[in-house]
Amino acid sequence: AQKVTQAQTEISVVEKEDVTLDCVYETRDTTYYLFWYKQPPSGELVFLIRRNSFDEQNEISGRYSWNFQKSTSSFNFTITASQVVDSAVYFCALSRGDSNYQLIWGAGTKLIIKP
Amino acid sequence: DAMVIQNPRYQVTQFGKPVTLSCSQTLNHNVMYWYQQKSSQAPKLLFHYYDKDFNNEADTPDNFQSRRPNTSFCFLDIRSPGLGDAAMYLCATSRESAGKSNQPQHFGDGTRLSIL
């Protein structure tokens, strides 16, 4: 069975702190894809990153970085020097990459950045 | 530049009165999706179109139907809305190759549906 676990329901930090959002997944597939999406209070889901199972390189995009570790089945997301605009719900999701188009979503982590 | 456009942003309907939500895209993506998202939950896939091929999720209620008259447009019809159908409805698109689902989905702003 496939599953995505985001154990942190809500995180609250003060602006400029670094924060890491955890994502742990379960799958028996050898080929799969992992995604992070951001959902600000306005409601739209914004794609942040995709990683395939064969690419374990970490990625950095400005203040955002992602750490993919197959050994621990984790795909964690770190925001450095957080800003109030980072306040949102962040979802981690898993795709099998085959003709099954259903994304397996984590429950989401609500991130609150206080000024 | 909105690429996946959902109208209206807010929709109020009466219990049992049919309602249609619309989605259009300028990305020319071949796959379109409809999701239902309730408060504090992850999105739940209702159905998707791969080109003109309609794919219904097994647990999508019969009350929900969809139409895709062309590549750019997709509609969600709720035939007899109940109070439990109040939710945010999200449309998404992606460009996929046959037999593969690995591309990011691009979402619209959503339509928040209220049932009176």
Image (spheres, rainbow, N blue to C red):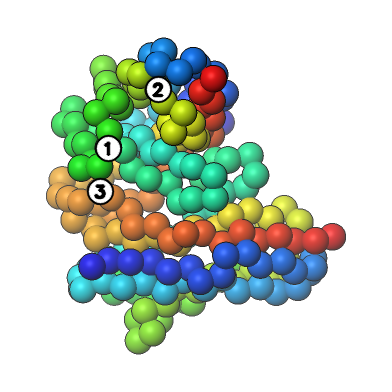
Mark 3, other Cα within 10 Å: few <14 / some 14–19 / many ≥20: many
Q: Residue visible at 39% across and 39% down?
A: B35
Q: Position of residue A2 (x, y in %)?
A: 27, 66
Q: Position of residue B77 (x, y in %)?
A: 34, 20
Q: Residue visible at 30% across and 27% down?
A: B64
Mark number displayed over residue B60: 1
Residue type pointed to by label 2: Pro
Mark 1, other Cα within 10 Å: few <14 / some 14–19 / many ≥20: some
Q: Which callout, 2 or 1, points to the residue nearer the camera? A: 2
Q: Position of residue A88 (x, y in %)?
A: 63, 53
Query: Disc 3 is attached to a residue of which chain?
Result: A
Mark number displayed over residue A45: none
Real-space Cα separation, disc 1 to disc 3, in angstroms = 15 Å
Q: Which callout, 1 or 3, points to the residue nearer the camera? A: 1
Residue designated by label 3? A101
Q: Earlier in the sequence, mark 2 or mark 1?
A: 1
Q: Residue visible at 63% across and 64% down?
A: A10
Q: Which secondary structure, mark 3?
A: loop
Residue type pointed to by label 1: Thr
Same chain under badges 3 and 2? The reply is no
Which residue extends farthest right?
A115
Residue designated by label 2? B81
